[in-house]
Image: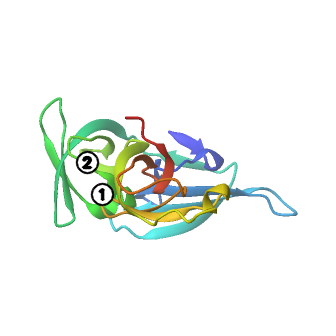
Amino acid sequence: MKVAANTLRKGMVVEYNEKLWVVMSNDIRTPGKGASVAQVVMRDIVSGTKTDIRFATQDMVERARVESMDFQFLYANDGEYTFMNNENYEQIVVNKDLIGEPAQFLQDGMMVEVQMHEGRPLSMTLPETVIMQIVEADPVVKGQTASSSYKPAVLENGARVLVPPHIESGTRIVVRTEDSTYVERAKD
């Protein structure tokens, strides 16, 4: 199925130059003169190399037929992550590179969406947010709460995140998995 270059979104899989690519980002740019262009960053699914392609916004790109399936996270071992399909109990093992930075937020039993092409995992989407506990946070400085500044904190998985000054060690917070940002204090 062909789609216009300006409709490409992160996570879409396309066929380009007889290879499969996953779209990392698509930035529509409008120069002072001339037509708009789509600046698309893509990663080759087989080799993992990234490329930056400039398309005219009306250019058509072949979108690969991809199946989305739900898998449950089982365990991690030396950068390899094992997931199970709850319908047929089939297990797949993927490399950390396929998941990227959000891998640090995987929790036992977490359900993820895996995009598959001809039985091979291409990309993975974690839930939008997770609840994590803060194990280390700088103390509140008197008068700092009035400003809109953020302070560094360390989560139970070792990830670093910026939190509002009133958040203390031991607090459970909601974190966005895509970019490791604080959303809100978790409701207990």
Residue at left offset 31%, top offset 45%: 117
Q: Secondary structure at mark 1?
A: loop
Pick the front one: 124 or 141: 141
For the residues marked 2 and 1, what is the alpha-carbon distance in whole angstroms?
11 Å
Residue 46's x, y, as percent?
32, 63
Label 2: state its secondary structure.
loop
**Label 2 amino acid?**
Gln
Residue that extends furthest to the front in the rendered view of this protein:
142
Instruction: Give the mark nearer the N terminus: 2 vs 1.
Output: 2
Depth order, front residue of 158/96: 158
Q: Is residue 74 visible?
A: yes
Q: Is residue 86 left or right of residue 123?
A: left
The amino acid at mark 1 is Glu
Identify the residue at image location x=21%, y=40%. Answer: 109
Vertical side of 14 occupied by 40: above or below: below
Q: Residue at x 34, y 68 (%)?
A: 47
Which of the 4 image quadrants contains residue 111? top left
Residue 12 vs residue 119: left or right? right
- Nearer the viewer's eye, disc 2 or disc 1? 1
Residue behind mark 1 = 156
Q: Residue at x 37, y 35 (%)?
A: 188
Residue 53: where, in percent of width, then height? 58, 65
Q: Position of residue 68 (x, y in %)?
A: 34, 37
Find disc 2 in the rendering and name its residue: 107
Drawn side of residue 157 relative to residue 31, left or right:
left
